[in-house]
Amino acid sequence: MGKKSKKEKKVKGAEKTAAKMEKKVSKRAKKEEEDLEALIAEFQTLDAKKTQIIETACPPPSPRLNASLSAHPERDELILFGGEYFNGQKTFLYNELYVYNIRKNSWSKADIPNPPPRRCAHQAAVVPQGGGQLWVFGGEFASPDGEQFYHYKDLWVLHLATKTWEQIKVTGGPSGRSGHRMVTCKRQLIVFGGFHESARDYVYYNDVYAFNLDTFTWTKLSPSGIGPAPRSGCQMATTPEGNIILYGGYSKQRIKKDVDKGTLHTDMFLLKAEGVGKEEGGLPLSDYKWVWNRLSPSGVKPTPRSGFSVAIGPNNRSLLFGGVHDEEEEERIEGDFFSDIYFYDMGKNRWFPGQLKGPKSEKKKRRRGKKAEAEGAGDGEAEGQSPQGPVEIVKEVVAEDGTVMTIRQVVSAPEVEPERSESEDEEEAGDEASGQQVEPCPRSNAMLAVKHGVLYVYGGMFEVGDRQFTLNDLYSIDLHKMEEWKVLVEMDPKTQEWLEESESDEEGDDVEGAEGGDEEAEEDSDEKSEDDEEEKQHPSVQLDEKYTDYLPRTEQYWIKLARHNMGPDAKEKKVAKLAHAMAKTFYEGSV
């Protein structure tokens, strides 16, 4: 045998380190999981009392994240399962099953006997056989205080035709984990990565397993080549040829005691089964030789982020939505959340951003206006006119206590339309819509599903300071047209309950101070009265004044007020975001 290369030795060393860490985590987590098993058993006892299937119409499900949303293979329905919600003091886990009727824009709840235990961060995949099946693997359960975790390694199937849950009890599958990814591929379920966490330790995975949907057996795949580093929350998609595309993800490692360093992965890989597709009815995927290959896609890749959501769109494209990029400051983490879409063309190995074209009627009006303007002016005069600059649009969610989530978007001026490329069809999605349009607020850990070429986005979360907003709104967009978002279920985050951790007799002050973002908890009544008086003296909106005129005129006032609220140490970028959000809120409340 020849000598091993440095790269091979490094890979082997990393595998040994990971194995040691997994053993260490497993040992420490065993006691925690034993404690949580008792709590899980209590919930299952309650679920066991369900003896019949009951379907009832209901309002939209409560706010949640890290659930699964799947398109029914035969009906115009979306299936929501599981998820979690945190109210500031307590973590809630769910195992409810909701069905969204696309045509009727209505929700129903299905109470089915013997469901899987409550969980979040699991994976679900739908196959059409037998009237449709929803397969669920893994996920986690957390103690109410969010300090202990139980990671599942169970496999369940929901038979959609009969609405019955069945646990598939077979050995040889992946260890308990959450944050993994699972896709269907040629009558197999393929599971990759994820992580396992105890109170003090954690381990990330990069192993690959295949579950055969015909023989009901697990097989651990051993691909050759240099594959992805261990990670969770990546994008995973199946190509028409039976290969697996993998992009991004998140992992962290301990660099010293009580100090962890997170990594936002932006690399991309192809997991290929050599020989697949050459023979009909050939070997199971697990019997093929699998190979990892590094991909170098062209185009515009997504900016680094974690917590993004993924789905498969039409025209052989996978898509990525939202997510968050955390900026580590001295003693806290500030997150920049996203609401953008990126497409990956699996045939061309190319990324491109999805941008709204705007409704056709508006585009025709703009074209007619532009044509008339051109006819009324000479060519020389037209050339001499400088195009209007980009317009910044600010959207935000402002809670009653002053907590603000800001959305800033720069769009082209109404009179200017970007030129379309003649060579690349994805540039058709590059015409940005003029004016302010409805769109989901930035978020991470949302649930996505695609049905008939329409993308549905449900729930998720965003943070402002130490406060978390969990969503239950529902949006849709036609991926063929990319014209505009539609709001199917609205939500006002400021109505959401948020409980701060209280301390002794200062409970009332603690709650109010924390809910107010960065205001000091010890703010006394005199200061509150002063703030109330100040609020009455905000710069008034002039008659017929547009927001684009109001903001420049009053911007310095709002920045000063935002600085007062956030303190002298707040970054200019954060202060500006808050200032613009408060200005927009006051403006909309005045017109």
Image (cartoon, grey):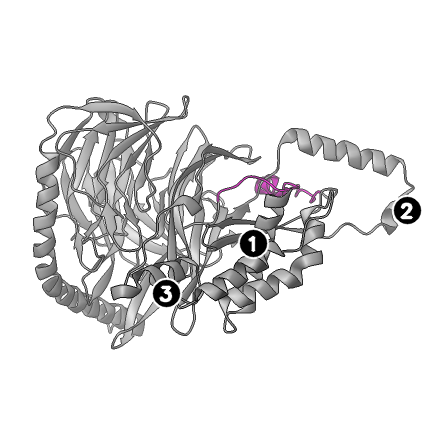
Which secondary structure lies at badge 2? helix
For the N terminus, the quadrant is bottom left
Instruction: Provide the major secondary structure of the magenta segment.
Output: loop
Q: Is residue 248 visible?
A: no
Cα–Cα span, label 1 and label 2: 39 Å
Residue type of the residue flagged with mark 3 = Thr
Q: Quadrant of residue 249?
A: bottom left
Decide if residue 373 is on the left or right side of residue 120: right
Seen at 86% across and 49% down, the residue is: 383
Q: Which residue is mark 2?
A: 381
Q: Which residue is mark 1?
A: 581
State yes or no: residue 435 in magenta: yes
Which secondary structure lies at badge 3? strand
Q: Nearer the viewer, mark 1 or mark 3?
A: 1
Between residue 116 and residue 184, name the one nearer to us. 116
Query: Where's residue 197, x and y in %?
Result: 21, 60
Which secondary structure lies at badge 1? helix
Query: Where's residue 411, x and y in %?
Result: 64, 48
Between residue 506 and residue 441, name the one nearer to us. 506
Q: Which residue is mark 3?
A: 263
Q: Residues within 10 Å of mark 3 (few under 14, many from 20)?
A: some
Cα–Cα span, label 2 and label 3: 53 Å
Decide if residue 590 is on the left or right side of residue 254: right
Q: Earlier in the sequence, mark 1 or mark 2?
A: 2
Residue type of the residue flagged with mark 1 = Ala
The magenta stretch spans which residues? 417-440
Q: Earlier in the sequence, mark 2 or mark 3?
A: 3
